[in-house]
Amino acid sequence: MTRLLRHEWTVATVGSVLLAIVMVWLLPPYASRVVTGGVKKETIANPAGSIIGDTGDPTAQAWLVAWNGQALRHGLRGLWHTNAFYPDRFGLAYTDTLFGYGPAGLIGDGVTAAVLRYNILFVLTFALAFLGGYALLRQLGAQWTAAALAGAALAYAPWRYDHAGHLNIMSTGGITLAVAMLARGHGWSLTRGHRGDRIRPGWAVAGWLVAAWQVSLGFGIGLGFVYLLALACVGAAIGWLVRGRPPLGRRLILADLIGGLIFTAVTAFFAYGYQQVRELYPYVTRSWDYVAVFSPTPRGLFVAPQYSLPWGTLHNDARAALGNAANEKALLCGYALYLLAFGGLLLSSWTVRQRLYLLAGTVLGILFALGTNGPTYRLLYEYVPGFDGSRTPGRLILWPTICLAVLAAGLLTRLAQLAREATLPQWWKVAVRVLTIPPLLLVLAEGMPDMDHPDTPAPPAAFTQASAPLMVLPSDENVDTNVLLWSTDGFPLMVNGASGYIPPDHQGLRDLMQTFPSEPSLDRLRQLGIRSVVVVRDRIPGTPYEAVLFAPTPPGVIRQDIGPDILYTIS
């Protein structure tokens, strides 16, 4: 038992979780107070009563996890057709599904459980990103501090905080962990190449399963991962043929067949849902001009998002200069990481050829991430299925970040090797090895977040008393994210919904309801079978729905004032 507790992977796993809790939840309030000279007086937030980031997208993502848990309870019946967006179908496929987090949705019910669950998962995404990076670099042959630096660079890269409300985009750890497992299963590393005596078929199966889980979270990040895995398989097959078709172990072949089939089946299952949406709504694809609005410029590589503690305030003007959708264009991977990766090009444990491949991967990845401002993204948009449905090419910055982290880890590994090999006094060797720790601490310091923890909006009493199917007014992307969270208590059928894509009929009903309770709006609601309309009074001011508060109640409609809000029951 003691040996298990002291094992490297036990320490790495527990350490990743503890580091994430400290970095994301416990330390930022105090660090922010120091950085601002005591101006900010934050305290550690209540994970059950507040939600990290803001009360917009995070509340919708908390609902997604809860809905997936609800679907699992019922044998996946109705998974694609959520309680939201009534009466439209395949509502789950309007955005990344987060289905891989479904088992967490089985724990607890209601709003409080959904919020607490989301906050825990948010912190764990950092832990998994760190652990995945650490595992990958250890498998490639990096020294442990170098592997930890790579994990820190991948988990706490400043650009990630631009996606604090996108749990699907923050969830990248499964990618590096799956690659680490697959490499281990196939006996491959950067330092040793391929060695048949190190093949572990069980690890290969585990790698495919983790890859399938990663894809089940969504294609926002998973789409590129799917294609890169496919390219890796093709490259491995070509390499096998070029080397004269050396014999392969039967167990490894069986492991790859089983794991690959599972991965393919999971990918096809989720691709099916998105294809159904494409058939229902042919205009769901993004135009090239629309992608241009969200495409970063090279300047974005040196600009940090708002939630970066060291750089957020300092880069306010630089972010403003990025123009519209600046939250998708701030792509800073970390100045410390840039410097260490450059050093890794000059001095490294990796070969010159490997370093050049990593440099090429970094440059190519950046060119893709620039979207319409780069020369290569058009190839993905025009010829690679799925990319024409994405509006945010900047999220491809993940792949250059991985290459930069591997380059930086090569530098630290080489420094440790030099200390071990040099004919120096023991104390000098220890001193040189200690020098590998400050870069790790520097990357962590630069990756410190400063995220908000607003209180979660409580569901109005009128909402809890409404009969389904129902609709809440006002209805827009900001309000409906909160309505989704409220619906986790029972999942009533409702018109409201918020996602990356809004069907035309849904938006048309929103527009019509600005005249509620006019006769045309009531006729449409009766056609759809809507039984209740809830008017949340404090959300109405400043919206096109203001006239609703002063409209007379027509015949056939019962109005009840419940607290500050209004419940209309339609007969």
Image: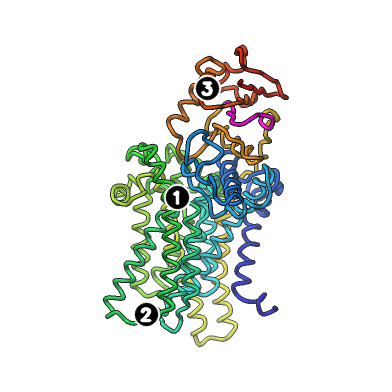
Residue under pointer 2: 248
Callout 2: SS: loop
Quarter of the rendering occupied by the C terminus? top right
Nearest the viewer among 418 and 392 is 392
Residue under pointer 3: 513
Distance (Cα) linking label 2 and label 1: 35 Å
Three-letter amino acid code of the residue under disc 1: Gly
Distance (Cα) linking label 1 and label 3: 32 Å
Nearest the viewer among 547 and 297 is 547
Residue 220, labelled with which disc?
1
The magenta span reads 463-474
Callout 1: SS: helix
Q: Is residue 449 magenta?
A: no
Tell me the crowding category of disc 1: few under 14, some 14 to 19, or many 20 or more residues within 10 angstroms, Cα based: many
Residue 431, labelled with which disc?
none
Three-letter amino acid code of the residue under disc 3: Met
Left or right side of 328 for 289: left
3 and 2 marks in contact (CB < 8 Å): no
Residue 6 drawn at (x, y percent): 66, 76
Left or right side of 404 for 289: left
